[in-house]
């Protein structure tokens, strides 16, 4: 079957879902985060069922697919769905907390050993009566009460005593959500903003929160193993998928020994400092995690300050914005039109947008270099607003990819029924829909 015929068939297959229900892809009331998808609450997570059904639709048209790529892997939604289908996987992310989450999802899934080790670590925690604070960093007294510091230190020491690295990773991931629950930063935003005095007084016990989170995560990992076994994609205590997680900038050079057959991803909708602050969200948890237990970390200055990760991400630097725009202006007419509108309102915001799209374009070129010819790409995108002007990221992405010789296949618009990302970030409060852009290399 030629590529154009496959494109038409894929378009028809995906369009068929909306014939009876125009809002099918909104997944209103049909999305439940379970098994490995519920190990961490990470910003702007994709809907597992949606990504899974999109992957299945492509697999129906191209049964030769064996390897999946996600250059913006985040907490690993695509990873989880790829594992459930026995597909090999490469995930890329600059955020160490995202890498940790993906490594835990990847396994091994030693359930009985994990339960035994969990009981031992909880006993160790209960028997540690020291009030010594084991972690120090600038601002620790601002972000944690003395009680929280002491209890988190008890947990930290107990995890460090665990001899098995795979188990420590599970514990550190449970620790990350514990830190978020007991810190002095408001949970209503991903940015670091101090709670009120009344809110700080009601902060729960870190030890109690950790135990609860750990036990629930063990249940989720057990459910993950059961699903993999039911789908016949489990070998011993591990997925049959070959999984590689790289901690690097998607816009930098990335070498892989393989070409990938399918890309499924959702890039940031803008630079992290003004949209979703993944780095600030992760900063405090990472301060309590032993980074030596996260494999293949490429940098050592992630935690230089609370904005460090976001500054390293797409659009983190606005240096040479004019030169960047000179390169982009021939690639995307939609970007040029949008920048012209923004310039009349707030010229400074042009630098941020240009720098973000420039870095995104480099990430797209890198991603294409890792894909085989005729590979499909599924991009979940949102059009945020800059200076109250909508940035048509869906059209910009299409044009950037077409400039590189890619082919447009289909686009689906979906309403966002639960706008966790938008509600938590005022900059995106008007974002009520996303686009699913399907392209072919």
Image (spheres, helix red, strand yellow):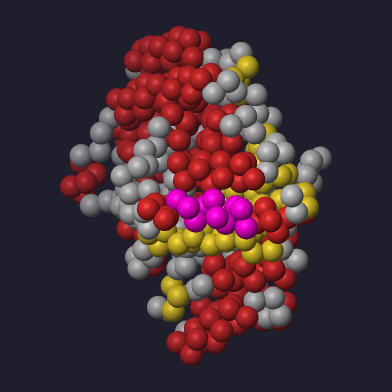
284 part of magenta stretch: no
Q: Position of residue 322 (x, y in %)?
A: 67, 81
Q: Where is residue 80 in the image (x, y as percent from the top left)?
A: 53, 35
Q: Looking at the rendering, in which quadrant would you find the C terminus? A: bottom right
- The structure residue drawn at horizontal position 75% and vertical position 54%, both measured from the top left corner, is 2
Q: Position of residue 277 (x, y in %)?
A: 46, 56
Residue farthest toward the left in the current orientation of the protein: 198
Q: Give the range drawn in magenta.
A: 8-17
Residue farthest toward the bottom in the current orientation of the protein: 344
- The structure residue drawn at horizontal position 57% and vertical position 61%, both measured from the top left corner, is 410
In depth, the one of 46 and 113 nearer the eye is 46
Rendered image quadrant of residue 369: bottom right
Examine the rendered structure and indicate whether residue 388 appears above or below residue 146: below
Examine the rendered structure and indicate whether residue 330 appears above or below residue 134: below
- The structure residue drawn at horizontal position 21% and vertical position 49%, both measured from the top left corner, is 197
14 part of magenta stretch: yes
Q: Is the magenta stretch mostly helix, strand or loop?
A: helix
Q: In this view, does 262 lie to the left or right of 99?
A: right
On the question of residue 300 being in view, the answer is no
On the question of residue 417 being in view, the answer is yes
Q: Where is residue 237 in the image (x, y as percent from the top left)?
A: 58, 16
Rendered image quadrant of residue 154: top left
In depth, the one of 324 and 382 nearer the eye is 382
- The structure residue drawn at horizontal position 47% and vertical position 31%, both measured from the top left corner, is 36
């Amino acid at each position: 079957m030629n590529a154009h015929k496959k494109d038409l068939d894929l378009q028809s297959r995906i369009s068929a879902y909306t014939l009876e229900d125009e809002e099918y892809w909104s997944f209103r009331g049909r999305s439940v985060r379970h098994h490995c998808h519920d190990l961490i609450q990470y910003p702007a997570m994709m809907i597992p069922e949606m990504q899974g059904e999109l992957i299945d639709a492509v697999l129906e048209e191209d049964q030769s697919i064996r390897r999946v790529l996600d250059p913006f892997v985040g907490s690993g939604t695509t990873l989880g769905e790829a594992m459930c289908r026995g597909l090999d996987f490469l995930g890329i992310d600059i955020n160490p907390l995202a890498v940790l989450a993906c490594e835990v999802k990847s396994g091994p899934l030693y359930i009985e050993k994990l339960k035994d080790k969990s009981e031992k670590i909880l006993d160790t925690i209960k028997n540690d009566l020291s009030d010594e604070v084991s972690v120090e960093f600038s601002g620790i007294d601002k972000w944690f009460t003395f009680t929280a510091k002491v209890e988190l230190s008890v947990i930290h020491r107990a995890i460090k005593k665990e001899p098995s690295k795979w188990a420590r990773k599970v514990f550190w991931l449970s620790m990350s959500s514990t830190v978020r629950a007991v810190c002095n930063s408001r949970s209503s935003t991903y940015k670091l903003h101090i709670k009120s005095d009344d809110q700080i007084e009601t902060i729960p016990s870190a030890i109690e929160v950790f135990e609860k989170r750990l036990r629930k995560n063990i249940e989720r990992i057990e459910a993950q193993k059961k699903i993999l076994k039911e789908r016949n994609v489990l070998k011993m205590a591990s997925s049959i998928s070959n999984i590689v997680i790289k901690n690097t900038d998607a816009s930098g050079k990335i070498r892989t020994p393989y070409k990938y057959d399918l890309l499924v991803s959702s890039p940031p909708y803008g630079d992290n400092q003004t949209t979703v602050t993944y780095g600030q969200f992760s900063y405090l948890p990472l301060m309590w995690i032993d980074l030596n237990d996260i494999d293949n970390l490429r940098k050592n200055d992630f935690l230089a300050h609370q904005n460090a990760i976001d500054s390293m991400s797409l659009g983190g630097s606005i240096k040479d914005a004019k030169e960047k725009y000179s390169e982009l202006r021939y690639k995307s007419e939609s970007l040029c039109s949008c920048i012209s509108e923004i310039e009349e309102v707030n010229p400074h915001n042009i630098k941020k947008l240009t720098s973000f799209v420039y870095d995104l374009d480099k990430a797209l070129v890198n991603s294409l270099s890792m894909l085989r010819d005729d590979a499909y790409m599924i991009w979940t995108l949102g059009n945020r607003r800059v200076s109250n002007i909508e940035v048509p990221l869906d059209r910009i992405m299409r044009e950037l990819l077409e400039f590189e010789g890619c082919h447009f296949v289909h686009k689906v618009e979906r309403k966002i029924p639960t706008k966790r990302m938008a509600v938590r970030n005022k900059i995106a409060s008007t974002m009520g829909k996303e686009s699913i852009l399907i392209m072919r290399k």
